[in-house]
Image: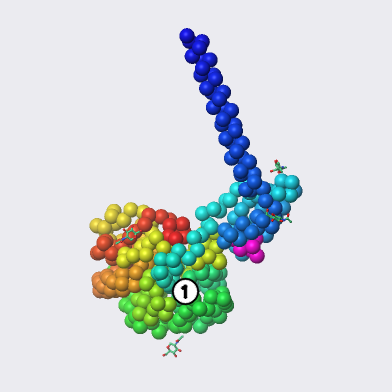
């Protein structure tokens, strides 16, 4: 009885095994036909995947049967494959998620404008957090490469650089030539200077060695983002429905986090009437101390490098930000935009969509 049972089991397992072998053989051979293609054909497939052939270069390793496809122009390896009998066998696509869904927002019929600015505030002479203007120009190349409608506020000394790096994208570029001294809201700077020079501000301030603690111009320009955004929605050069700020130095030169250059990008999954920001940590613990936060050594929770939403919400946020900023100045408080935006959030949480993430996660989270 027991023996018969075991024998049946063995027979069933054998049948399953034979079937599974046939089945896998089928898959394998299908894969073989699909993947065993010659070089030309493979390059065509890359093209279909929106990987531009011109930008594909082949590199052989020591092993002659091994070939790597990389994209030049700062974008890392997209496809690794190796030759076998002069056929290309696609083995690994390390960057699959980077093959973008080009034109998602065009399909939805929505237009997006990205806004940024770059001004030399003499950072290379700072006691700490030193960076040169040239560092920032280098960083800005990644933002300039974005295939987006781009509004770029810049002073005369950076104008040529910006225009040069938008060649071919002139129809998607608005360069706003200005000095920060010419901003309509310039009057806030002197208020910030007075506050930051005061004894009250400096007493028990734990961040006096940080830009937010020692540079009025820094704080002024961080708050300028909201005025620049507002003005941009009023001009609305590109007839956009949505506006997003991105720091000109976003990613600090790390091109790997940016989408491929030839691929239109837009934060399609956050196009609504809320202000989206990346939240770097829990917010509510700071609520009781929000008006003392500017003196406290706590890590930022709002990532000021990127934010935005619909035209309507940008204009509402501008008014809220201006009210909070003026209240802060009246009470001798000032900090960078990240702390003031957090105060705005506590004031009107329903205006915001805070998405948990890291400093460099914009393109990972929003597309
Ligand atoms: C490469 O493969 C494609 C598709 O299989 C074929 O049409 C073409 O003739 C091949 N070219 C060479 C040089 O073998
Ligand atoms: C060369 O490539 C073949 C095929 O992928 C692989 O089996 C072999 O291990 C490689 N040899 C070396 C030295 O990497
Ligand atoms: C800023 O304003 C001053 C005085 O009106 C003017 O001379 C200067 O050209 C302006 N700068 C820019 C870049 O528009
Ligand atoms: C806006 O979009 C985000 C992300 O899709 C979503 O979580 C949020 O609920 C939306 N807010 C409104 C008011 O539609």
Residue ID at (28%, 64%): 351
Quadrant in which ligand 2 is drawn: top right
The residue stretch that appears in magenta: 51-56
Residue 19 image offset from top left, x and y in percent:
56, 30
What residue is at 54 percent from the left and 23 percent from the top? 13
Identify the secondary structure beneath mark 1. strand
* Relative depth, front residue between 107 and 365: 107
The correct choice, above or below, for 82 with respect to 102 in the image is: above
Residue 72: image location, x then y, percent:
63, 62
What count of labels does the image hold?
1
User: Which residue is outermost to the top?
Assistant: 1
The reply to whether residue 40 is in sight is: yes
Q: Which sits in the foreground, 148 or 225? A: 148
**Residue at image mark 1:** 150
Q: In the displayed structure, does residue 44 sit left or right of residue 302?
A: right
Whether residue 205 is visible: no
182 vs 123: above or below: below
Magenta span includes 30 = no
Which residue does the image show at 46% across and 57% down from the upper left?
Answer: 364
Asked whether 32 or 327 is in front, the reply is 32
- 259 left or right of 84 in image: left
Provide residue 166's location: percent of width, then percent of height.
54, 75
């Amino acid at each position: 009885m027991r023996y018969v049972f075991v024998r049946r089991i063995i027979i069933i397992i054998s049948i399953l095994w034979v079937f599974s072998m046939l089945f896998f053989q089928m898959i394998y051979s299908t894969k073989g036909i699909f993947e065993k293609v010659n070089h030309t054909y493979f390059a065509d497939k890359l093209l279909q995947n929106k990987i531009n052939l011109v930008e594909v270069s082949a590199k052989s390793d020591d092993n002659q049967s091994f070939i790597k496809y990389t994209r030049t122009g700062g974008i890392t390896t997209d496809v690794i494959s190796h030759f076998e009998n002069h056929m290309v066998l696609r083995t690994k696509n390390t960057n699959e998620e980077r093959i973008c869904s080009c034109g998602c927002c065009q399909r939805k019929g929505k237009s997006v404008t990205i806004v940024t600015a770059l001004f030399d505030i003499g950072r290379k002479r700072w006691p700490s957090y030193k960076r040169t203007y040239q560092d920032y120009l280098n960083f800005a190349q990644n933002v300039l490469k974005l295939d987006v409608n781009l509004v770029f506020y810049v002073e005369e000394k950076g104008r040529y650089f910006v225009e040069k790096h938008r060649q071919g994208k002139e129809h998607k570029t608005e360069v706003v030539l200005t000095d920060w001294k010419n901003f309509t809201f310039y009057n806030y700077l002197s208020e910030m200077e007075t506050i930051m020079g005061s004894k009250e501000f400096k007493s028990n301030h734990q961040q006096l060695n940080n830009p937010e603690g020692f540079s009025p111009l820094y704080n002024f320009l961080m708050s300028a983002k909201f005025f620049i955004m507002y003005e941009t929605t009023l001009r609305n050069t590109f007839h956009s429905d949505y506006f997003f700020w991105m720091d000109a130095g976003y990613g600090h030169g790390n091109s790997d986090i940016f989408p491929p250059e030839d691929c239109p990008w837009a934060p399609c999954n956050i196009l609504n009437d809320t202000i989206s920001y990346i939240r770097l940590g829990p917010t509510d613990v700071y609520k009781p101390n929000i008006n003392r936060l500017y003196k406290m050594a706590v890590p930022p929770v709002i990532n000021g490098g990127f934010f935005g939403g619909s035209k309507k919400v940008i204009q509402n946020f501008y008014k809220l930000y201006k009210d909070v900023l003026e209240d802060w100045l009246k009470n001798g408080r000032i900090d960078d935009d990240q702390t003031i935006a957090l105060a705005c959030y506590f004031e009107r949480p329903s205006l915001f969509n805070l998405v948990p993430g890291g400093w460099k996660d914009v393109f990972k989270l929003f597309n």
